[in-house]
Amino acid sequence: MNAQVFEITYLDLLICALLMLIPYAVSRWLRLGLDRDLLVGTIRVFVQLLLVGFILEWVFAINHPLPILGILLIMTANAGVHAAKRAGLPQTRIILTAIGVIGVSSFAVSAYVFYLVVGVTPYFNPMYVIPMMGISLNGAMNAIAIGARALDEGIRDGRERIEAALCVGATSWQASNYVVQRAIRQAMTPAINALMTAGIVQLPGVMTGQIIGGVDPVMAVRYQVVIFYMLASIVALSTIGGTLILSRGYFTSSHQLK
């Protein structure tokens, strides 16, 4: 499939940035208090993505596994930190747990997809590894953030119920499993909704980008299906692992609520 790719200049980006005046004006008009976040976000997405573009251009030119591994590790660490911050729980224990769970689930499932499904060669091919790992890490980060926040709120709101169950001999898991289940369900809901609405309500970003770039639509769809399956698996693993590990931190070794 041959398609014309229209070039976007820096001037075009600045013109497009004028669209951000719409949510900014809405925030000011309704006094939503989002003015600063919108302004900072508009500037950050411009600067950060341009910087990433230059870094990736350099990495692609080097074509060596070590810089790619370094970038992936930095991305994983950032994902863990931001997951804890989004959950409103920026404690060291939660950050380290998020980094570990996000890293293990994303690397494991992505490796399965790269080498058994797509057949990426060489094994460190940055054109595939970095973008797809970025999608994986973002999905895991969002899931951990939602699950950790829901868990914390559930434990705090249900403190009396949990303590009552502990008093009659229940273990920490028996007393809090309903909170854990609800947190996992909330964290997995966005990924499930994406599976349900893909192609009907929205055309996913990866598929849209490939089509605009001239890839055959059927091949673009295949890649998007692979990414959906990959994301759903990563979200499930990271949510279950992270929520179970974090839930233990609310109890002592004697099954007492801290």
Image: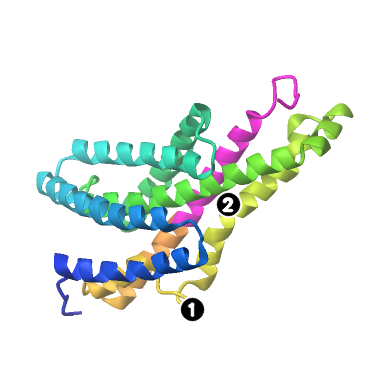
Placement of 50 over or under 13, stated as above or below = above
Residue 231 placed where, x, y %? Answer: 45, 55
Give amino acid for label 2.
Ala
Task: Tell me how far mark 1 sits from mark 2, CA to CA.
Answer: 23 Å
Give amino acid for label 1.
Ile
Magenta stretch encompasses residue 78: no
> Dot 2: within a 10 Å radius of its alpha carbon, few (fewer than 14), some, or many (20 or more) residues?
many
Taking the image as shown, residue 8 lies to the left or right of residue 226, namely left
What are the residue bounds of the magenta stretch?
A: 231-258
Q: In which quarter of the image is residue 225?
A: bottom left
Looking at the rendering, in which quadrant would you find the N terminus? Answer: bottom left
Q: Which mark is first along the chain, 2 or 1? A: 2
- Judging by the rendered image, the residue that carries numbered circle 2 is 187
Taking the image as shown, residue 181 lies to the left or right of residue 242, namely right
Q: Report the number of numbered marks.
A: 2
Please tell me which residue is depicted at 41% across the width and 50% down the height of the picture: 138
